[in-house]
Amino acid sequence: MDHFDIVVIGSGPAGQKAAIAAAKLGKRAAIVERRHMVGGVCINTGTIPSKTLREAVLYLTGLNQRELYGQSYRLKSDITVGDLSARTMHVVGKEIDVIQNQLARNSVTMLIGNAYFVEPHEIAVEDATGDLKRVSADHFVIAVGTRPARPSTVEFDGITVVDSDQILAMDRVPGSMVVVGAGVIGIEYASMFAALGTKVTVIEQRPTMLDFCDREIVEALQYQLRERGVTFRYGEHVRTVENHPSGTLTILESGKKIPADTVLYSAGRQGVSDELRVEAAGLTADARGRLKVDEHFRTAVDHIYAVGDIIGFPALAATSMEQGRRAAYHAFDEPVGATDADLQPIGIYAIPEISFVGRTEDQLTTANIPFEVGVARYRELARGAIMGDSYGLLKLLVHAEERTLLGVHAFGSNAAELVHIGQTVMGLSGTVDYLVDAVFNYPTLAEGYKVAALDAVNKMRAIARVRAEGHRLDLDAGEPAVG
């Protein structure tokens, strides 16, 4: 039986970083993955292919150029699945090669097969032929991720009724689509297919979408999607989906019936801990297959860690990578700096893009924290005009007394890149005054930070001016000054 210092189950972003971090510490590390899933869901059916698809859609439809060349502008009039998948396959292939090279370069042993626990310090790895290999380790990191949740009332055929893992394998661009679930994945795909000209209907049981985002930003996205013909049905529950030769019929609890060529069911994901037989290791998963961990990503069993989507929110590739690194460091008593969960950026790759870091206006209001808002609109920036983006915006939430940044919210082109400037200022406890005094390249979208900072400071200055004037009038009247 092979023995390792650490065995990582799953080669997605969290698993890769955990294994490589351990190897960099001089530990003997192994990573287990199924044969056709090197890189995990992220590389094969999730983040990388969906974001590559988004880039292909933007390029082929010419969507970002229409403000400059007219609404009829398109790079290609008849876009096929082949056009879209060619770019996706190229990028996925390159990313898999990069991952395999990184693991090999760091002497991480790759074990191909399906893993499950035999006992707390031992797993079995079953290959495609059914042969079993026993492996033991001092530490384990579970990084197996999730799979799409599939309700029993819906029959998935992978062609007309699909989940978020199957949608990339469709053989055509549908003329109409129902998207069930207005979460991150649902909204990303809804926006992509709407850009392709698909008539999209989004069904969501909650009263709004993306309720963890800033309300103004969500309203801006919703407006843009409606402009592209997307219909939203909030407060609705899907009773069943019927599959007919002529298409699908989504039947809602309210009695509404919505016909469409394709239904994308994107209502949550389920952890795959059941396949690991975690009970044999002394662990118990919750109803959604997720594992509970402490602040070091350690499970109830001290030598077993869990990272990535399997532990729940935020379930992002970026945060998962950092969780994997921190878990490996903790396992081998390697010091690691403190992290602030409030400073982890969120990126939503819809069309248009959303990204934010810190708190929203609603959160600050609920917490009774005084703040001022500074906004820069892309149409005010020369770079926005050059790019043909007049709808984007950058919003800063500034503490009204301490002048520190409490939140940064970006909407529009390159939002996920732009947010990192604000993240850095927040991480270094900088104030809005730094952004006011800083010089940014011109023309850039980053210049929006200065515009938004000046907007917030001018509002704060107006408040101070009113208070100072009131103070002067009180003194002139011979009355005790107030405030």
Image (cartoon, grey):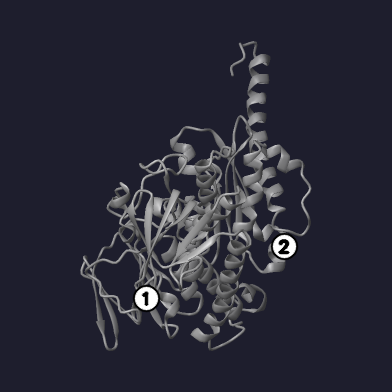
Where residue 363 appears, as percent x and y from the top left, is 46, 41
| Amino acid found under the numbered disc labelled 1 | Thr
Q: Nearer the viewer, residue 245 or 233?
A: 245
Residue plotted at (56% across, 72% down): 52
Where residue 38 appears, as percent x and y from the top left, is 50, 68
Mark 1 secondary-structure assignment = loop
Q: Mark 1 or mark 2: which is in front? A: 1
Where residue 239 appears, as percent x and y from the top left, is 22, 68
User: Which comes sooner in the sequence, label 1 or label 2?
Assistant: 1
Name the disc covering residue 129, or none.
Answer: 1
Q: Nearer the viewer, residue 371 or 154?
A: 154
Furthest-front residue in view?
Answer: 1
Residue plotted at (40% across, 43% down): 293
| Amino acid found under the numbered disc labelled 2 | Arg
Residue plotted at (35% across, 41% down): 300
* Quarter of the rendering occupied by the C terminus: top right
Mark 2 secondary-structure assignment = helix
Compared with 333, 394 (above or below) is below
Which residue is denoted by mark 2 in the rendering?
383
Compared with 402, 341 (above or below) is below
| Crowd around label 1: few <14 · some 14–19 · many ≥20 (10 Å) | few
Residue plotted at (53% across, 74% down): 53
Where residue 372 appears, as percent x and y from the top left, is 58, 39
Q: Residues under labels 1 and 2: Cα distance?
A: 57 Å
Is 268 displayed left or right of 85 in the figure? left
Q: Is residue 409 visible?
A: no
Q: Which of 351 and 83 is in front in this view?
A: 83
* Quarter of the rendering occupied by the N terminus: bottom left
| Crowd around label 2: few <14 · some 14–19 · many ≥20 (10 Å) | some
Q: Can residue 313 be seen in this view?
A: yes
